[in-house]
Image (cartoon, rainbow, N blue to C red):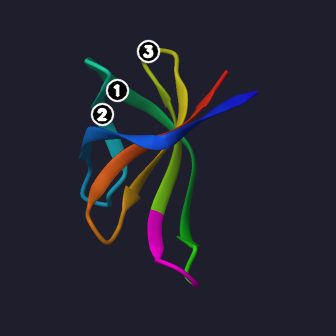
Amino acid sequence: MTRLLIPAERVTLESDDDGVPISFAWRGRKHKVVEVVERWRADAEWWRVRQWRECFTVATNTHLLLTIYRDLSRGEWYVQRIFD
């Protein structure tokens, strides 16, 4: 089961030189990424307003499994989905 956050919630994120998340602050707590489970790029709704994203499913030291993404046009990071 998953929970989609609408709208996605903005996070402050630290990444390595390859753009891979290392840690992020969300809802007043810092989360360290312990594993990147999946990584992909999405070009969503190109027929309306283009949403170019780099997405990651990550496991954290706080026992969360989340999908986070970077809006490539703005450089901002968001939490989009929480896995139960």
Contact, mark 3 vs mark 1 (Cβ under 8 Å):
yes
Which residue position is annotated with label 3?
62
x then y, percent, for residue 63: 51, 16
Q: Farthest residue in the front direction?
A: 48
Contact, mark 3 vs mark 2 (Cβ under 8 Å):
no
Q: Amino acid at mark 1?
A: Lys
Q: State the image quarter where residue 12 is shown.
A: top left
Left or right of 41, for residue 9: left
Identify the residue shown where x is 37% and y is 56%: 70
Towards the viewer: 84 or 60: 84
Contact, mark 2 vs mark 1 (Cβ under 8 Å):
yes
Identify the residue shown where x is 34% and y is 26%: 32
Spatial CA span between label 2 and label 1: 4 Å
x then y, percent, for residue 34: 44, 29
Q: Farthest residue in the bottom direction?
A: 47
Counting other residues with Cα less than 10 Å from the Cα at mark 2, is it few (<14), some (14-19), or many (20 or more)?
A: some
Q: Amino acid at mark 3?
A: Thr
Identify the residue shown where x is 32% and y is 21%: 27
What's the magenta region? 47-53
Towards the viewer: 16 or 73: 73
Towards the viewer: 38 or 7: 7
Q: Residue 59, relative to residue 78: is it above or below?
A: above
Spatial CA span between label 3 and label 1: 8 Å
Q: State the image quarter where residue 2 is shown.
A: top right
